[in-house]
Amino acid sequence: MNRLLLVRRKFNRRKNFNPFSKIKIRNFIGKPDLVLLGTIFVILIFGLVMLTSASSIKSYREFNSTYYLFFHQIIFGLLPGTILFFWLSRVSYHLWEKYSVLFFILSLIILGLVFIPGLSLEIGETKSWLKIFGASVQPSEIIKLFLILSLAGWFSYRGREKNQDFWNGLIPFVFILGLISLPIALQPDLGTLVVVAVIALSIYFVAGAKISHLLGLAAVGLGLFGILIFQTPYRAERLMTFLNPELDPQGIGYQINQALLAVGSGGFFGLGFGQSRQKFAYLPEVIGDSIFAIIAEELGFIISLSLIFLLVFFAYRGLKLARGINDEYGKLIVTGIIAWFIFQSFFNIAVMIGLMPLTGIPLPFVSYGGTALATLLAATGILANISRQAS
């Protein structure tokens, strides 16, 4: 009889077993920063609306459906991203601190997968995608978030005194940044490399880096970027086109000239939603890194400036959140995410108005890309979680 009761208790324990029971999901007393999240929500909705217009011609031409690419973004970007957002907004961000090394190792593994034949998907001149079960995944978008979590954990564990030291702070940081940068440079994906470097340097700065160390890194970095540019003919041509857009208007300068034409033709109030002319196969990458030019063409200067204002306001709220956090780990995570969102956004816009050389950097929350949108929403969930505990 006693043995029967013992077996029954073991069975009941197994029946009620929850593999996620050790994950801390708390009902936090504080509320998230609704202004910060609301700003992101407005940018996201605006981006989805603009994607319906920018992608309509390409969708119909390639898939015989005006909204094919839009629904693809919803299914493979918005839906998984929303799930990740709500989950990560409830799971305490402190949980991820003990997995900092694991996140870095996973980043290297994921980046290495693009060099494996059969998994790698080459688009254009870069091997930046993986083909998994018929779907394309961009590892470089995932590793941005993993890098933030790993660097935040590493710097907060070591303390500001070690972070300021040359041998214990600067040299290990350079080694870590070099490990993560090498596979990105080999793909090659110079745009992502720039974003990753800015994210890492921003976290390093807030973690206590000396200004002299940062200036030295910036000088070395510019030198290395110069080498990467001039060792590849098409990158050197892009730089020369940036300096002189009329140099090759039908060749390497075609995209930037068409983008400037789109931005200029929009005027103050635009041609009207859906009325872009450049999306009719004139402007390359209308759903990717050129989508801001379509926004300016259809909605004009006023709406484009409003989008920039939203980005500036988002940066302000994010930095305010970072300053209000007493926890070093949380502060560094917020710093990395804000640096990622804002730098990538303004770099993309600067390219489209001719202030920066042409690169393949998408506009966060607006450009097409399921992996990018899902990862951005996951990062937003972590921001929401941190703001709950900081309030």
Image (spheres, rainbow, N blue to C red):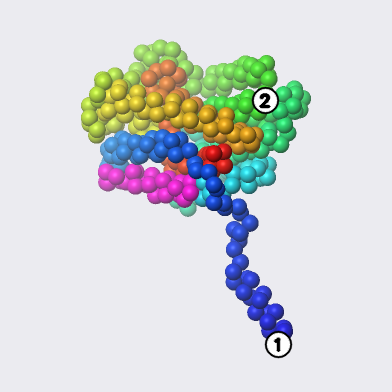
Residue 185, position in %: x, y? 57, 30
Placement of 275 over or under 242, stated as above or below: below
Residue in the picture at 43% in, 45% down: 77
What residue is drawn where x is 49% and y is 22%?
235
> In the drawing, does residue 344 fall left or right of residue 74?
right
Main secondary-structure element of the magenta-colored stretch: helix
Q: Is residue 218 left or right of residue 136?
A: right
What is the three-letter code of the residue carrying label 1? Met
Q: Residues within 10 Å of mark 1 (few under 14, many from 20)?
A: few
Q: Which residue is mark 1?
A: 1
Residue 66 drawn in magenta: yes
- Image coords of residue 341 (percent x, y): 48, 32
Give coordinates of residue 255: x percent, y percent.
36, 24
Q: For numbered disc 1, what is the local secondary structure?
A: loop
Answer few, some or many: residues within 10 Å of disc 2's Cα (few below 14, many 20 plus, some between 14 and 19): some
Question: What residue sits 61% from the left and 66% below the top?
Answer: 17
Residue 164 locus on image (x, y percent): 72, 24
Residue range of the region highlighted in magenta in the rendering: 63-86
In the image, residue 371 sits, relative to residue 312, either above or below, namely: below
